[in-house]
Image (tube, helix red, strand yellow):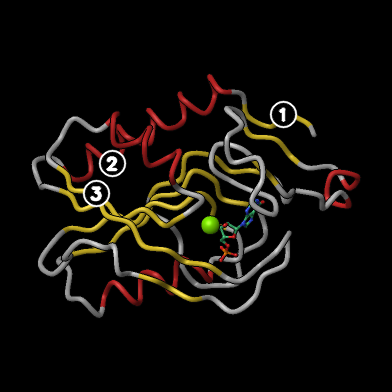
């Protein structure tokens, strides 16, 4: 594995994004919706950088993937807050093909929020398959499979304090 972003770089990027978010919303209270599971570390750090009125909810988007390939997406929103008439900010770990966020945003819009915007830690370069851009992006990264700071490979590595790119030999090793 090689380090792509250090702990200090991640913290600085999240602080920068928090400032952009605070500036964009001003005095408007915010409903933050974290997409489980990859957003948990970002969510915890980001909300503590936001000195404003906000509520936090979560939903789960899982694509029955194991490893690095994607499958059918299912969204479980049983744990989410009421978003009707609220300014909603969806938080996710990475904008890769973009299908996850597009589907999550579509689902939230059915609930008649005042607005829905999206914030991601990472946007992977050259991978997008959708006509959609997140409003807030902390880092652009090259097209590599990354882990750490909430991101996993086969449910491992979410606890790394830095962001690392997996090398081909790491990908071949599927033991848990
Ligand atoms: P998308 O729907 O293709 O944008 O994929 C979004 C989801 O795929 C993210 O929330 C991650 O869970 C997962 N994902 C995409 N790329 C990576 C990666 O490089 N490392 C870990 N997870 C990834
Ligand atoms: Mg995810």
Can you tell me whether the CB of the residue at mark 3 lies under 8 Å from the nearest atom of ligand 2? no
User: Mark 2 and mark 1: span between their CA atoms?
Assistant: 27 Å
Of residues 23 and 144, the one nearer the viewer is: 144
Label 3, residues with CA under 10 Å away: few <14, some 14-19, many ≥20: some
How far across and how far down the image is residue 14, in percent? 42, 32
Instruction: Identify the residue at image location x=59%, y=41%.
Output: 158
Q: Which mark is first along the chain, 2 or 3?
A: 2
Instruction: Identify the residue at image location x=57%, y=35%.
Output: 159
Can you tell me whether the CB of the residue at mark 2 lies under 8 Å from the nearest atom of ligand 1? no
How far across and how far down the image is residue 173, in percent? 86, 49
In which quadrant of the rendered view does residue 44 lie? top left
Closer to viewer: mark 1 or mark 3: 3
Of residues 124 and 3, the one nearer the viewer is: 3
Instruction: Identify the residue at image location x=34%, y=56%.
Output: 90
User: Mark 1 and mark 3: span between their CA atoms?
Assistant: 30 Å
Q: Which mark is first along the chain, 3 or 1?
A: 1
Q: Which residue is mark 3?
A: 56
Closer to viewer: mark 3 or mark 2: 3
Callout 1: helix, strand or loop?
A: strand
Image position of 40 with respect to 108: above or below: above
Instruction: Identify the residue at image location x=16%, y=65%.
Output: 82
Callout 3: helix, strand or loop?
A: strand
How far across and how far down the image is residue 19, in percent? 30, 32
Image position of 62 with respect to 46: above or below: below
Which label was assigned to residue 21?
A: 2
Which label was assigned to residue 3?
A: 1
Q: Which mark is first along the chain, 1 or 2?
A: 1
């Amino acid at each position: 594995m090689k380090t792509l972003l250090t702990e200090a770089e991640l913290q600085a990027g999240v602080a920068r994004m928090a400032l952009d978010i605070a500036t964009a919303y001003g005095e408007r209270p915010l409903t933050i919706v974290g997409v489980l599971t990859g957003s948990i570390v970002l969510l915890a750090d980001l909300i503590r950088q936001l000195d404003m009125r906000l509520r936090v909810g979560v939903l789960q988007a899982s694509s029955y993937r194991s490893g690095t390939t994607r499958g059918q997406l299912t969204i479980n929103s049983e744990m989410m807050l009421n978003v009707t008439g609220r300014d909603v900010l969806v938080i996710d770990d990475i904008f890769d093909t973009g299908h996850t966020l597009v589907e999550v945003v579509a689902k939230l819009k059915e609930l008649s929020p005042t607005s829905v915007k999206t914030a991601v830690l990472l946007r992977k370069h050259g991978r997008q398959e959708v006509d959609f851009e997140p409003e807030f992006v902390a880092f652009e990264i090259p097209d590599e499979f990354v882990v750490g700071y909430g991101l996993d490979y086969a449910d491992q590595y979410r606890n790394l304090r830095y962001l690392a790119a997996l090398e081909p030999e790491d990908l071949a090793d599927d033991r848990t």
